[in-house]
Amino acid sequence: MMIVMRTTVTIDDDLAAQVEALRRREGLSFKAALNQLLRLGVQAKSTPPKPKRFRTPTRKLGLKPGIDPTRLNALIDDLEIADFAGGER
């Protein structure tokens, strides 16, 4: 079922030029070009954009031998406790 709605719209000059360019390029009527652009715009707004994959670059930590990178939090805790205790280790 197709609902026909007639209405008057005011289109900015830059958009009217783009509709006219599409109309000429594809050999469409003004109505067909406008409907095509409206459909594309409505579909674009209703479909969320696909998120870009976020990547974090990796790099060498340059840790000294004997330091376990999976236990850095424990090392920081030990250093903070030693600092709090007056520098005793």
Image (cartoon, rainbow, N blue to C red):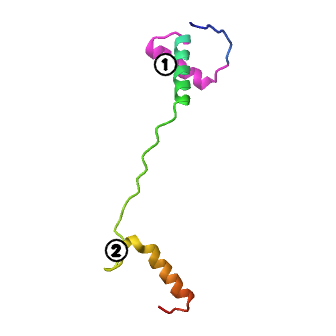
Please identify the quadrant where the N terminus is shown: top right
Q: Identify which residue is drawn at 35% across, 65% down.
A: 59
**Which residue occupies 53% across, 87% down?**
83
Tag 2: amino acid? Gly
Is 25 left, or right, of 60 in this rendering?
Answer: right
Given residues 13 and 1, the one toward you in this image is 1
Residue furthest out toward the left: 65
Which circle, 2 or 1, is nearer the viewer?
A: 2
Magenta span includes 22 = yes
Residue placed under numbered mark 2 in the picture:
62
Q: Main secondary structure of the magenta part?
A: helix
How far is disc 2 from disc 1 in space, using C-alphas? 58 Å
Tag 1 secondary structure: helix
x and y, in percent, of residue 87 in the image: 52, 91
For the point 36% across and 78% down, the residue is: 67
What residue would you read off at disc 1? 22
Quarter assignment of residue 11: top right
Q: Residues within 10 Å of mark 2 (few under 14, many from 20)?
A: few
* SS type, badge 2: loop
**Dot 1 amino acid type:** Leu
Q: Please report the bounds of the magenta region as a residue range.
A: 10-30
Asked if disc 2 and disc 1 are in contact, CB closer than 8 Å, the reply is no
On screen, residue 85 versus residue 25, left or right, reads right
Q: Is residue 45 above or below residue 8?
A: below
From this view, report whether residue 9 is shown above or below residue 88: above
Residue 72 figure quarter: bottom left
Residue 15 spot, x, y in % from top left: 58, 24
Residue 64 percent across, percent down from the top left: 33, 79
First in sequence: mark 2 vs mark 1: 1
